[in-house]
Amino acid sequence: MINLIGKRLLIIDDDLSVRQSFAFQLRDAGFIVLEQPAPAQALAELHTSELPDLVLLDLQVNHSQGMQVLQDLHSQFPLLGVIVASNVGTINEAVQALRLGAKDYLIKPIADVNTVVASVSRVLNQRELERVNLRYHDQLRVANTELQDNLAELERDHIAGRRVQKRMMPTGLSTPDGYKVQHQILPSLYLSGDFIDYGLLADRYLVFYLADVSGHGASSAFITIWLKFVVSRMVREEGLFSQPENFDNDPNRMLQQINIELQDTKLGHHLTFFVGVIDTHTLQMRYLVAGHLPLPLLKTNEGVSYLEGKGKPVGIFKNVDWTVHKLQLPESFSLICFSDGILETFANVTLQEKEKILRQTIESSDGTLDSISETLAIRDQERPDDIAVLTVTRGLS
């Protein structure tokens, strides 16, 4: 309920005794009451002075011209509340008055003047609620406009951010020894928390990794940019994966350094990783798994199987050592790595069933990125999570 004390009322009634009776009772209730017997004069004054909070209009004013006055009030001052009083009291008149904008209809003679006070109070409260609601809708309209503008700007920023991410990633790699590396990232949003990088170092070591940052959106995408910087710095300044004697341990050294620096950033994100390095001269591979699912699949002439391995995610635990696994690759193979978003494309089945479906899908493909993407139809699916695919192949026609 609003405070009605001091609210301004205008009574338009050419019956002096009725007007004075209403005015006395309303003033006694705390209202400021203005009186006007002539409707034309009242309308003129409303155009040149502060509008009252409510008008009390006699429908028989000026030889029963009150209905026309009501129509004029509603058309000229649509936000002004009007209560009408009539000694006719027919349903047709009441309906007509309400259609013309009256907020209440009182029947004269009014034996209890408190009825007028109650009507005035009820209509003023209703009008205040309408004003609050109107302000709310105006604020909501402004907020929605701002939200649409902000979303458009955010979309533009995300598109720009996605372009930055794409520019940071490699564009594919082929080596003279017949190795070929390709990748595809399908973000669920404009920005992706999945990141892939690879390169041939010292003209011998084919290094690749797939990282999946916890969370989604801009903060996760920022971590991918940071990750690119950290790994590039280690390769450039610390000779990562560039010396034969470091072949066995550099995958672990890489993740240990990322683990330390990620915790120092205090950004609240962690990463899952698959890191691999292949000696292209000997077909020896070293790899490690850091909380990453699904495990990579190796397709050879003998079939398709998951690699072995497990390890803690990066960025949660201190002083972690990851197990570096050894694998002798055949002359012809396809190594396929996915981010965990691929598992979300298989609905309503267990993890073991999802892994089985994924392995069977790889078996029915030829092991190339195009064949895998087409077989899984991941380009055409709605994605609840980012999907990243990395393929390393050799000897495939």
Image (spheres, helix red, strand yellow):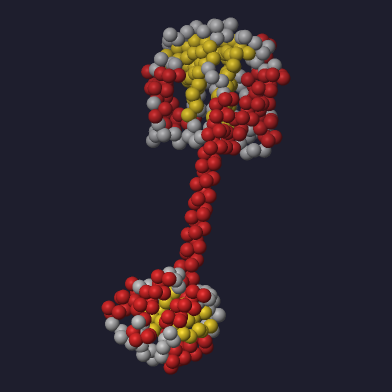
Look at the picture and state if 24 lies above or below 376. Answer: below
The residue located at (45%, 81%) in the rendering is 41
As drawn, 171 above or below 51: above
Q: Is residue 309 visible?
A: yes
| Number of numbered callouts drawn | 0
Q: Is residue 112 at least partly visible in the picture?
A: no
Which one is in front, 100 or 266?
Answer: 100
Question: Which residue occupies 38% across, 72% down?
Answer: 101
Query: Where does the image place residue 200, in percent across and percent down from the top left?
Result: 60, 13
- Residue 271: x and y, percent? 59, 31
Left or right: where 143 falls relative to 319: left
Report the residue that reaches farthest toward the bottom. Answer: 17
Please indicate whether residue 64 sits to the left or right of residue 197 in the image. Answer: left
Q: Quadrant of residue 379?
A: top left
Asked if residue 80 is positioned above or below residue 204 in the image, the reply reads: below
Q: Nearer the viewer, residue 287 or 229?
A: 229
Q: Quadrant of the C terminus?
A: top left
Could you tell me which residue is drawn at 53 percent across and 78 percent down? 7
What residue sits 40% from the left and 25% below the top? Answer: 376
Residue 212 % position (x, y):
55, 30
> Which one is in front, 196 or 45?
45
* Nearest to the observer: residue 294 or residue 146: 146
* Coordinates of residue 345 in the picture (x, y in percent): 42, 31
214 w.r.t. 45: above or below: above
